[in-house]
Image (cartoon, rainbow, N blue to C red):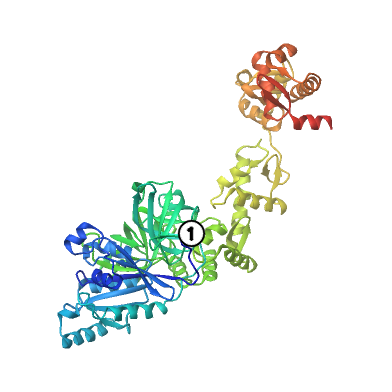
């Protein structure tokens, strides 16, 4: 196994430029490897799918070249290749200059947040020096005001080799200025290749966007929602123990078949990502007019989906404008906050614009000022984890749900989870967030949640006057605010400590509340008491129900009696009085302490019971841990025998 060292700095370089301007040729000249791997690509002389080759720039600097297609029909693939790159190698042919895909690729790079690049003026062997100088001047003007403004413009011929070392030197210098990616956060990788290897199984490949992964780690594929285990890891065609942020990686995963995965799926630490069908966006338009509710192609990372674009601040968007919008996807995808994207026309594939995701799990919005204000705050909080959390907890109308630290760590994908806890503690101290272990809610919502919980208990008891308490899960189900079972338990315990609720009988009630029996309730209860106090102490549930059928509240009072312990429900649907059951327990304990074991048939004869009644009693004592079964016999459990002796 090849171990990764701290001295190695891994980068990803993506090519960009018009079709047939020599992107693959310059990569081949720089690395000695052909990025066109498909037979059709070699036959047509045109890149169709992504190509990957590796290069070592020395001094611990290594890079993977991702060669993307330039033809407009393959823009989807080009976007997948651009996603996650550190540096763009922008290619313009000297004999043609700026062409349509030159402009489109530059716009895509801008929308996807690429900030570093080198320009290669290819095919210099096809033009004279005067023409080449005109091309330089034209490109300098073309790139003015873009991230390539002032970048090296290196003329090169991939045929003669002239200028190749100049491109290599410019790339090395540019890479030295690329800031390192944050090393913290959970593992995440967008999948751009998936294939199967005989003897190994499914392999997925991509560029590590955050965190790191080791062999034997458990990961999750979204939006498939499948857990997988990492069986092997490769980077730069070598087996390694771990891959980290910025590295190209191929992971051999167990637990999923190749046919179940596709480019655009994401591999991440379990719980980091979740499928979503709706996104809030900040959108910058390159083309127009685009009308409200237009259907668009949405590309982010390596994924593509169709969706309906809903402007939140206009009816029509024009070229050069910026808008807040919501996108309703036609199929789910995994997404994170502040992830860049582009949108294209669904039929012509023309680039319409791009921007960043502000909220991957929004609620449906109307055009209201509070929506725009909240989105503006989310936009301003980019790059500031503390400000982002504060914004999430102070939104005018955020989702009605509590957040666990692990979920918020998913929001802050590059922040270590321990630091997320510290940020939350700061918000609690400031009175912005409130803690309901193990989760957090906006402090401004806490009193409303408290009142809703009390109201849920009051409402449930009002609907059934003889109920003594409402179980915790029923209270949670009645809340419009989404809490986990643990969070709801913390809330109810807090309300009980404050005297606003009272814990009783495994549930909660209003302080001092007692059941209120109507005349019908009292009549049915009296009849039930008369029944159980006369005749046999054990009866079938069916017999009791038939007896109470003539009373309006008969069924209700039977349930009431069982809940309050006035009666005991045994297995086999047999009802008995608690005194009778306790007597039989004492008799059985005494007998087993003296005789060791008893059989069901023997027990039946001893107490003159039916087979069904004997079985019901013995099963009841077994379920409560008083006895254990050994074949067809029953004996005292070790725990109960010890307690009885004590």
Please give left or right for residue 384 compared with residue 518 in the image: left
* Residue 318 visible here: no
Q: Which quarter of the rendering shows the C terminus? A: top right
Q: Label 1: which residue?
A: 241
* Residue 188 visible here: yes
Residue 524 spot, x, y in % from top left: 66, 25
Residue 251 spot, x, y in % from top left: 42, 55
Please give left or right for residue 39 compared with residue 167 in the image: left
Helix, strand or loop under label 1: loop
User: In this orientation, which residue lies closer to the viewer: 260 or 316?
Assistant: 260
Q: At 57% across and 50% down in the image, what residue appears?
A: 484
Please give left or right for residue 371 compared with residue 92 in the image: right
Q: At 46% across and 52% down in the image, what residue appears?
A: 230
Please give left or right for residue 389 compared with residue 205 in the image: right
User: In this orientation, which residue lies closer to the viewer: 101 or 509?
Assistant: 101
10 Å neighbourhood of mark 1: few (<14), some, or many (≥20)?
Answer: some
Q: Which residue extends farthest right?
A: 646
* Quarter of the figure with residue 114: bottom left
Q: In the figure, 547 relative to 291: above or below?
A: above
Residue 204 spot, x, y in % from top left: 38, 55
User: In this orientation, which residue lies closer to the viewer: 535 or 524?
Assistant: 535
Q: In the figure, 4 relative to 140: above or below?
A: above
Q: Which residue extends farthest front?
A: 1
Marker count (numbered) = 1
Q: In the figure, 53 relative to 129: above or below?
A: above
User: In this orientation, which residue lies closer to the viewer: 439 or 54?
Assistant: 54
Residue 516 spot, x, y in % from top left: 69, 36
């Amino acid at each position: 196994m090849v171990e990764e060292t701290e001295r190695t700095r891994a980068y990803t370089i993506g090519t960009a430029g018009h079709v047939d301007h020599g992107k693959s040729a310059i990569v081949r000249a720089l690395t000695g490897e052909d990025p066109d791997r498909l037979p059709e690509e070699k036959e047509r002389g045109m890149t169709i799918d992504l190509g990957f080759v590796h290069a070592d720039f020395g001094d611990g600097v290594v890079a993977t070249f991702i060669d993307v297609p330039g033809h407009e029909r393959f823009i989807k693939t080009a976007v997948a290749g651009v996603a996650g790159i550190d540096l763009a190698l922008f290619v313009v042919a000297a004999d043609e200059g700026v062409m349509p895909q030159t402009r489109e690729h530059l716009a895509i790079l801008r929308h996807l947040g690429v900030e570093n690049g080198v320009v290669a003026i290819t095919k210099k062997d096809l033009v004279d020096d005067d023409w080449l100088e005109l091309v330089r001047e034209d490109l300098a003007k073309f790139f003015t005001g873009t991230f390539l403004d002032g970048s090296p413009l290196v003329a090169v011929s991939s045929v003669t080799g002239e200028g190749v070392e100049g491109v290599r030197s410019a790339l090395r210098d540019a890479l030295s200025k690329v800031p390192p990616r944050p090393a913290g956060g959970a593992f995440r990788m967008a999948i751009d290749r998936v294939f199967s290897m005989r003897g190994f199984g499914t392999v997925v490949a991509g560029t590590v966007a955050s965190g790191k992964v080791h062999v034997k780690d458990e990961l999750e594929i979204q939006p498939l929602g499948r857990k997988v285990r990492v069986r092997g890891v490769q980077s730069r065609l070598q087996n390694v123990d771990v891959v980290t942020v910025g590295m190209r990686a191929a992971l051999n995963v167990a637990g999923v078949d190749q046919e179940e995965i596709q480019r655009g799926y994401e591999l991440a630490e379990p719980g980091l990502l979740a499928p979503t069908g709706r996104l809030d966006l900040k959108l910058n338009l390159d083309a127009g007019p685009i009308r409200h509710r237009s259907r668009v192609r949405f590309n982010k990372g390596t994924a593509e989906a169709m969706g309906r674009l809903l402007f939140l601040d206009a009816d029509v968007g024009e070229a050069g404008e910026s808008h807040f919008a919501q996108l309703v996807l036609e199929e789910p995808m995994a997404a994170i906050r502040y992830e860049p994207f582009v949108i294209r026309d669904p039929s012509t594939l023309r680039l319409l614009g791009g921007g960043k995701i502000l909220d991957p799990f929004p609620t449906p919005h109307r055009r209201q000022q509070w929506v725009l204000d909240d989105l503006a705050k989310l936009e301003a909080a980019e790059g500031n984890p503390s400000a982002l959390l504060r914004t999430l907890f102070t939104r005018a109308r955020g989702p009605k749900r509590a957040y666990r630290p692990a979920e918020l760590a998913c929001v802050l994908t590059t922040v270590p989870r321990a630091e997320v806890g510290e940020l939350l503690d700061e918000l609690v101290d400031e009175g912005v967030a409130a803690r309901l272990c193990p989760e957090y809610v906006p402090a401004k919502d806490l009193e409303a949640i408290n009142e809703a919980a009390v109201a849920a208990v009051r409402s449930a008891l009002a609907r059934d006057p003889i109920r003594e308490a409402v179980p915790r899960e029923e209270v949670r189900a009645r809340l419009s605010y989404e809490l986990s079972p643990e969070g709801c338990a913390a809330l109810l315990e807090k309300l009980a400590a404050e005297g606003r609720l009272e814990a009783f009988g495994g549930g909660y009630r209003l302080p001092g509340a007692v059941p209120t029996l109507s005349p019908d309730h009292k009549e049915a209860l009296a009849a039930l008491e008369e029944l159980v106090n006369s005749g046999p102490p054990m009866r079938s549930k069916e017999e009791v129900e038939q007896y109470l059928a003539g009373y309006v509240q008969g069924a209700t009072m039977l349930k009431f009696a069982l809940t309050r312990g006035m009666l005991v429900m045994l297995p086999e649907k047999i009802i008995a009085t608690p005194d009778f059951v306790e007597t039989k327990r004492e008799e059985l304990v005494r007998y087993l302490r003296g005789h060791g074991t008893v059989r069901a048939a023997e027990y039946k004869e001893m107490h003159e019971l039916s087979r069904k009644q004997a079985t019901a009693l013995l099963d009841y004592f077994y379920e409560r841990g008083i006895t254990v079964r050994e074949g067809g016999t029953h004996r005292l459990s070790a725990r109960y025998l010890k307690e009885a002796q004590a």
